[in-house]
Amino acid sequence: MWTLSCLNKKQSRLAIGLKIWIDILTPKQAFFASKLSQTLMKDHEVWMTSRNYPQVTQMGKILGIDLEIIGKHGGSTNETKLSASIDRLHGLQTRVNDVKPDVCISFLSPEAARISFGLKVPHLAESDSPHASHVCKLVVPLLDSLYTPYSISLDSWLQYGIKKEKIHRFRGLDPMVWLRDYKPNSDILKKLGLTERDRIVTIRTEEEQAAYVDRSTVSSIYPITKKLAGKFPDHKFVILARYTNRMKIEREDNILNVEGIIDGPSLLHYSKLFIGGGGTMTQEAALMGIPSIGAHRSSIPEVFSGYLIPKGLVKWRTKPAEIAREAEAMLSITNKVRSAQKKKVARLISVMEDPIPEIAKAVQTMRVAHN
């Protein structure tokens, strides 16, 4: 698999580049890793792993990144999650022993953390999700370095046992890594049977299988969509469901259920409004100047409470009636208001920092420090 040779001497390895292992578990991580790997591959070899999880494997194909699949997604129960993690650890141990990476990069992967710790591989992670407490408890204490947006407080990470000097904050948000030079593709409209003339409202359902989610509550996205579709018959409502078995609304003339992974940023580019039950697409929409409503039922993630909401780029509503009212108000605003929002976003983006150059420098430093 590896093409590097003459790696017996430490000096030679550092001169010709490192072996860098990136573990990817979600579509968002695939976007970030795609841009990061492009930079790292200029000087190093990069090996990217994932698990058998359609949301990631499909996104990998869309982005054109080569993923080695080891293990599978654990589903929704604690028992199946634990079993899948244990099985994946066995598979990763064998492959990591074969590959012998110099540095591991993840986005808070429990398996990457355990393998890196056990095999003494330096581990750098990037994350904007301290609210994912189950994963953080397993990963953060074992990290050698953590990169995170400045809008997230140090205390949010320190509570998990990491030392302050290992935390590196950048003045930006994760999606800017892949949105800064993103070019929308109109093919997404053809794929969905839409046109640029359509008034599109994109809706992302909530995560229902993550460990931090309270699955006892019922999503309000579907009844809200049905209500809005009835009130705005001249709009097209596109529902992006995370899991196809959770589809709860029949297709109507102006409601479209989308199965599988699609080019989300391109769809957002053509959307008039976004309602998000999760975090990443809500950030993407806001940073693209699309009027956005965060509808996650859990506590508000810090990237929103500490930045996007105070900047007026996202409205956060959790009660169905409030979400519906906010959506109706946003769908009634003029194109002039939308244009002003896009200009505001452009100013904010112009001063945001890109963490990738610093991460690229850090991997070399980490490897030298461990020799």
Image (cartoon, grey):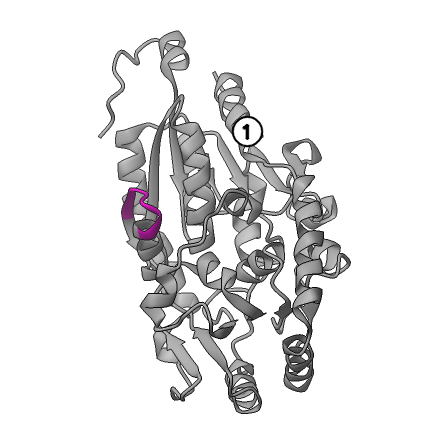
Asked which quadrant contains residue 278, the reply is: bottom right
Taking depth in this image into account, of 323 and 151 the one nearest to the observer is: 323
Judged left or right of residue 192, residue 359 is: right
Up-down relation of residue 5 to residue 2 (above or below): above
Q: Residue at x 55, y 37 (%)?
A: 143
Taking depth in this image into account, of 232 and 34 the one nearest to the observer is: 232
| Secondary structure found at label 1 | helix
Judged left or right of residue 251, residue 132 is: right
Marker count (numbered): 1
Q: Residue at x 40, y 8 (%)?
A: 11
Q: Check the image and name the residue furthest to the right.
A: 310
Where's residue 182, x and y in %?
48, 47
Is 67 one of the magenta-colored residues?
yes
Up-down relation of residue 117 to residue 304 (above or below): above
Up-down relation of residue 121 to residue 280 (above or below): above
Quick one: label 1, few (<14), some, or many (20+) residues within 10 Å? few
Residue carrying label 1: 357
Quadrant in the picture for the N terminus: top left
Judged left or right of residue 116, residue 132 is: right
Q: Residue at x 47, y 79 (%)?
A: 236
Where's residue 364, x and y in %?
49, 21
Where's residue 243, x and y in %?
38, 72
> Is any part of residue 87 visible from this angle?
no
Where's residue 48, x and y in %?
34, 39
Is 179 one of the magenta-colored residues?
no
Region in magenta: 62-69
Asked which quadrant contains residue 75, the reply is: bottom left
> Is any part of residue 165 visible from this angle?
yes
Asked which quadrant contains residue 52, the reply is: bottom left
Q: Amino acid at mark 1?
A: Pro
